[in-house]
Image (cartoon, rainbow, N blue to C red):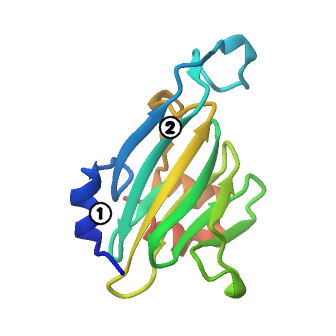
């Protein structure tokens, strides 16, 4: 049975997310990692891991942002989610998160710490219910929402995509 985005939003009690879409934090490890053991860029102790549900609908987007930890995306329901990742050297990856493995989709996608990424559902009327696991755990102190002009200046070859995935 195919559920609707409204079904998932209601059943999971998802709330608006600052980068776009809707989410709910489902896990925050009780284990704390001391900042002395963490990579540069993390300004304090962090939970070992965190996990959220994340829902995007066609017409919405997750704006380009980056975090200081690796993020693993998991596909749960709906339609293919395209996650655009810009590596520091400017290489663009268009990851397809979904169930159609034979056509290049993946049930999991890993975004490396520090890389810029944004996402959207490109199926008319579609949605994607996903999950994101971050380790070391997510903290808004490690979150940077892209400034359109700055990101376009850094990666002019991707200016049109950046324009469409920034606010």
Q: Quadrant of the N terminus?
A: bottom left
Q: Residue at x 59, y 40 (%)?
A: 134
Give the residue at the far right of this rendering: 89
Can you say whether 137 is above or below 95 in the image?
Answer: above
In what element is the residue under mark 1?
helix
Residue in front for this viewpoint, 163 or 6: 6
Q: Quadrant of the C terminus?
A: bottom left
105 displayed left or right of 131: right
Can you say whether 128 is above or below 140 in the image?
Answer: below
11 displayed left or right of 29: left
Circle 1 Cα neighbour tier, 10 Å, few/some/many (<14 / 14–19 / ≥20): some
User: Quadrant of the rendered structure where residue 42 is?
Assistant: top right
Q: Residue at x 29, y 53 (%)?
A: 12
Residue in front for this viewpoint, 71 or 31: 31
Residue in front for this viewpoint, 2 or 155: 2
Task: Please provide percent x and percent y for residue 60.
Answer: 34, 69
Q: Which residue is mark 1?
A: 8
Residue 143: give its label. 2
Circle 2 Cα neighbour tier, 10 Å, few/some/many (<14 / 14–19 / ≥20): some
User: Quadrant of the rendered structure where residue 108 is?
Assistant: bottom right
Residue 106: give its label. none
Can you say whether 113 is above or below 5 in the image?
Answer: above
Q: Nearer the viewer, mark 2 or mark 1?
A: 1
Give the residue at the far front of this rendering: 1
Cα distance between the residues tagged 2 and 1 = 26 Å
User: Quadrant of the rendered structure where residue 84 is?
Assistant: bottom right
Res 56 seen here: yes
Numbered-mark total = 2
Task: Please provide percent x and percent y for residue 45.
Answer: 58, 15
- Disc with the residue nearer the chain's start (2 vs 1): 1
Residue in front for this viewpoint, 152 or 141: 141
Q: Residue at x 23, y 68 (%)?
A: 6
């Amino acid at each position: 049975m195919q559920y609707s985005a409204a079904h998932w939003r209601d059943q999971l009690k998802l709330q608006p997310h600052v980068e776009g879409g809707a989410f709910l934090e489902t896990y925050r490890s009780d284990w704390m990692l001391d900042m002395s053991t963490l990579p540069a860029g993390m300004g304090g102790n962090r939970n070992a891991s965190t996990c959220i549900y994340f829902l995007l609908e066609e017409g919405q987007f997750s704006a380009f942002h980056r975090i200081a930890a690796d993020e693993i995306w998991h596909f749960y329901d709906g339609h293919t989610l395209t996650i655009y990742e810009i590596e520091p050297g400017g290489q663009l990856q268009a990851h397809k998160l979904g169930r159609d493995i034979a056509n290049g989709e993946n049930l999991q996608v890993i975004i490396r710490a520090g890389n810029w990424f944004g996402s959207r559902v490109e199926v008319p009327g579609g949605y994607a219910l996903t999950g994101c696991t971050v380790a070391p755990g997510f903290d808004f102190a490690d979150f940077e929402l892209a400034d359109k002009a700055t990101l376009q200046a850094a990666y002019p070859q991707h200016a049109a995509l950046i324009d469409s995935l920034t606010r």
